[in-house]
Image (cartoon, rainbow, N blue to C red):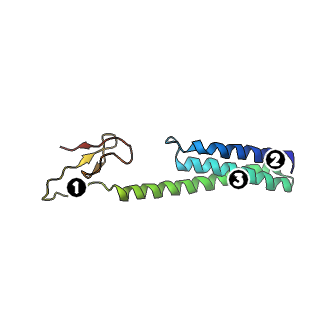
Amino acid sequence: MSRVAAAVVGVCAFALVGCESMGTAAQSKTTQGAVLGGLVGAGTGAIIGNQSDHAGAGTAIGAGLGALTGGLIGRAMEQNDQQAQQQQYPPASSSSSTSVSKTKFCPVGGETFAEDVKYCPTHGVELKYKE
């Protein structure tokens, strides 16, 4: 294995070890997928490109395709999470019923929820009662 390929593999391995801290709330799954896909694609592209004497081009193409694919997969995962969250915490219905039921709302986003939901699943804040 040449020095370039070994260096790329080493950088990718180091980056993958650091990916454990990528799961912060500030980074979406789309971003995480794009970064991880770009790193894996760059490493794979460098190895394959090195075999055909085009390590630089292989790295660039692999990084681009990996980032695109990882971003798309991450976005699909985010959408699935949002759908599951909406099914688990459906908004309170606006139809009036005969039972006395108070609805709660999120002070940050304004979404309404049933009385049994205590915290906003999107913003994590305690829900307030609607008057």
Q: Residue 18 carries which label?
A: none
| Secondary structure beneath label 1 | loop
Q: Residue 6 carries which label?
A: 2
Label 2 Cα crowd, 10 Å radius (few <14 / some 14-19 / many 20+): some
Q: In the image, 130: left or right of 73?
A: left
Q: In the image, 87: left or right of 5?
A: left
Three-letter residue code for mark 2:
Ala
Q: Earlier in the sequence, mark 3 or mark 2?
A: 2
Q: Which of marks 1 and 2 is nearer the N terminus?
A: 2
Residue wearing tag 1: 94
Q: In the image, 13: left or right of 130?
A: right
Three-letter residue code for mark 3:
Gly
Residue 10, x across and y down, in percent: 76, 45
Image quadrant in which the C terminus is located: top left
| Secondary structure beneath label 3 | helix
Q: Distance between the residues labelled 3 and 2?
A: 15 Å
Residue wearing tag 3: 41
Residue 80, x across and y down, in percent: 47, 58
Label 1 Cα crowd, 10 Å radius (few <14 / some 14-19 / many 20+): few
Q: In this figure, what is the number of numbered marks?
A: 3
